[in-house]
Image: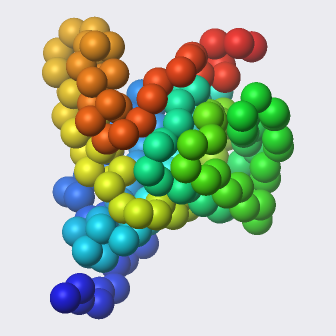
């Protein structure tokens, strides 16, 4: 049985935000809170930042832009999203995004079913290992969470 809670705005379900290649990810509702049904995260993306091209075989994601100017690539098509816009990405759609603005951008990310919050916790730990990140270990982690890495971030393409 899940329990209700109120989480202060600065807090997350993990002890600190996860730093994923410069994106700060705060878990607001963890998969463990919902018996794996959903997860909710607050993402702060630095200017130019964003993930590599990838897809989730199991999870759908909904991004709600709180502030900032973002570019989303969904199955090869570019879209703009700004404050108040919603981007829905069903499982199986190759995607990536980039903060195209000059200030950090903020988004809420709703994931169904949950599990990506646990992925981000493990990825954060991998990225804290001294030295260059191990791309084979990162790729293996993606595979374990039923995801595929497919290409570079949008920032690598200009």
Q: Nearer the viewer, residue 83 or 76?
A: 76
What colour scheme governs how the chains and residues are painted in the rendered image of this protein? rainbow
Q: Where is residue 23 drawn, in percent x and y?
A: 47, 38
Q: Is residue 57 above or below residue 59?
A: above
Looking at this view, name the residue that lies furthest to the top.
132
Q: Is residue 153 above or below residue 124?
A: above
Would residue 108 be found to the left or right of residue 70 on screen?
A: left
What residue is shown at x 81% (from left), y 34% (from top)? Answer: 78
Quadrant location of the C terminus? top right
Residue 63 visible (yes or no): no
Residue 45 visible (yes or no): yes
Disc tally is: 0
Q: Nearer the viewer, residue 68 or 116?
A: 116
Would residue 145 be found to the left or right of residue 84 on screen?
A: left
What residue is shown at x 67% (from left), y 57% (from top)? Answer: 88
What residue is shown at x 48% (from left), y 42% (from top)? Answer: 56
Tell me the quarter of the picture where residue 122 sits.
top left
What residue is shown at x 82% (from left), y 41% (from top)? Answer: 79
Q: Where is residue 2 drawn, in percent x and y?
A: 23, 85
Q: Where is residue 6 drawn, in percent x and y?
A: 34, 85
Would residue 3 be found to the left or right of residue 64 on screen?
A: left
Q: Where is residue 30 drawn, in percent x and y?
A: 30, 66
Quadrant location of the N terminus? bottom left
Tell me the quarter of the picture where residue 136 sits.
top left
Would residue 134 be found to the left or right of residue 156 on screen?
A: left
């Amino acid at each position: 049985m899940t329990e209700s809670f109120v989480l202060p705005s600065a807090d997350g379900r993990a002890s600190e935000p996860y730093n994923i290649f410069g994106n700060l990810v705060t878990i607001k509702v963890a998969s463990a809170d919902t018996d794996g049904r959903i997860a909710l995260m607050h993402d702060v993306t630095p200017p130019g930042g964003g993930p590599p091209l990838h897809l989730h075989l199991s999870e759908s994601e909904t991004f709600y832009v709180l502030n900032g100017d973002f570019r989303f690539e969904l199955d090869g098509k570019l879209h703009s999203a700004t404050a108040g816009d919603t981007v829905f990405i069903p499982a199986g759609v190759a995607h990536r995004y980039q903060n195209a603005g000059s200030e950090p951008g903020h988004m809420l990310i709703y994931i169904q079913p949950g599990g990506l919050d646990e992925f981000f916790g493990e990825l954060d730990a991998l990225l804290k290992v001294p030295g260059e990140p191990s791309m084979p270990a990162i790729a293996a982690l993606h595979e374990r969470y039923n995801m595929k890495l497919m290409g570079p971030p949008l920032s690598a393409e200009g």
